[in-house]
Image (cartoon, rainbow, N blue to C red):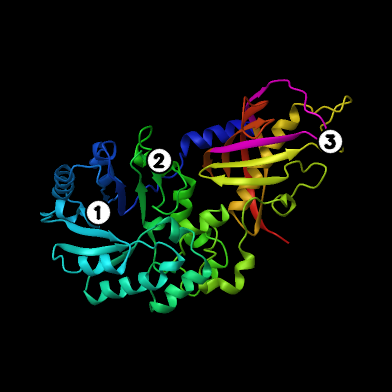
Amino acid sequence: MSLPEQLQKSMTENPAPVHAEISVLEIELSGLTMSAKQEEWQKIGVQKIILHADKTLDSQRVLEYARTLRQNGLQTELLIPADLRNEYDDPTGLRLFCRAGTDAEVEELCNDSKLCGIELIYTGADAVSDFVKAAQRCKAASLEVRFGCSDAFINASLEEIRKIADANERSPYPVGMNCMRAINSCFIAADGEVYPCQGCRISMGNMKETSLHEILQNSTVFSFYRNFREQLKKPCRDCAIFGQCVGCRGRAYHATGDFLAADPACPRSEKEHDKILSLPIRDPANYMPHKPPMLMVSTLHTVADNLCETDCTVAEDNPFLREDSTLHPSAFIEIGAQSLAFLDTFLHPGKHLNGMLVEVMRFENKKEKIKVGDTLFIICRKSYEMPPWSIGEFEIFRDHANGKPVAKGELKVCQFSAAEKP
């Protein structure tokens, strides 16, 4: 039996493992999300639902929906803006939380007996003192305190986070400590997009097109976050409280472009921030065993869920050049394979993933003439992975992902080992 035949047999007999289980689901309510199948959520282990409602929704319909979830055995919480709390005057059987951004708002909410807690919204560097005061007021009133994933928080600097941390002894969320939202739950936006959490806006799929179970089953981000002890990068992974905390995943992704990076605004790793890499990555030789002139891919621009973007500038000594100084079509296959290798090693820091191209399953070439000095942009997608086998698709463009691709294909790859980098 040939190696490609062995690969096909292995994939047929040993489908990819399913680990699509979460305990908490946060939902931004809309007509779409309220029509989702509740039975599916319970099948993947969901025990608690946190519903985000706003003024565009009818409060009675929201309450009716929340009670239905509760009657079906799901712990249900409602999160609403502070100015809507009078519309939710009978949340019997539900846990009601309000969003608040100032100490004055919190002071007023503390007198509302139907509230279980408050989600504090950080509004920026000029509001640090007020934010801290509001948090302390909530604790004094024995209200549960949560910290919202506002844009200001996701973009907060190390100095801002340190001030908040210093004012709140072991404050749970502002410094990333004890926040495991991206690890234990996921967030469904009103348009059906599914994210690891409200702050980490890296799409894993859309419920308009795919079931939540299938989205989670096929998501690299979801899989890596569930296996965070092995996957998150240093210096976060070397922290004394790693396991209780994973930093703010939203801030890490927003600041670096890498969903596995350490949180760059965490004071605990302040002295090691030089070890936190940000995309784009322009040193492919540190990620692949290839050497020039065979090494053709030059930059890793973005990494998303099962997806990456790279580029390649055709050099004068490129081994795939023909006599007329145009690129032979077989070069596109190698460029696609190198892009996949770049992605794999970036996601597994400290290791070179040695392997081989097993089969070109599909290849299309538009026969455009690519010359020395031309820059190509590559989009790669992982469509299947069951170590040591994987399948990836690639598209190559002359312009940055605009227009029609000059070549595209699908590759089967086998990775033999993960050797430590020298």
Instruction: Describe the element under mark 3 as helix, strand or loop.
Output: loop
Horizontal side of residue 315 vs 396, given as left or right: right
- Identify the image quadrant of residue 392: top right
The structure residue drawn at horizontal position 16% and vertical position 42%, both measured from the top left corner, is 61
Horizontal side of residue 87 vs 411, given as left or right: left
**Do tag 1 and tag 3 residues touch (Cβ < 8 Å)?**
no
Which one is in front in this view, the residue at disc 2 or the one at disc 1? 1
Estimate how packed mark 1 is, as few (under 14), some (14 to 19) or many (20 or more) residues with alpha carbons within 10 Å.
many
Query: Of callouts 3 and 2, which one flags the residue occurring earlier in the amino acid sequence?
Result: 2
The disc at residue 319 is 3
Give the amino acid type for the residue marked by disc 1 in the picture: Ile
| Closer to us: 403 or 106 | 106
Horizontal side of residue 122 vs 158, given as left or right: left
Work out how far the residue at label 3 is from the one at label 2, CA to CA, in angstroms: 40 Å
| Closer to us: 264 or 57 | 57
Estimate how packed mark 2 is, as few (under 14), some (14 to 19) or many (20 or more) residues with alpha carbons within 10 Å.
some
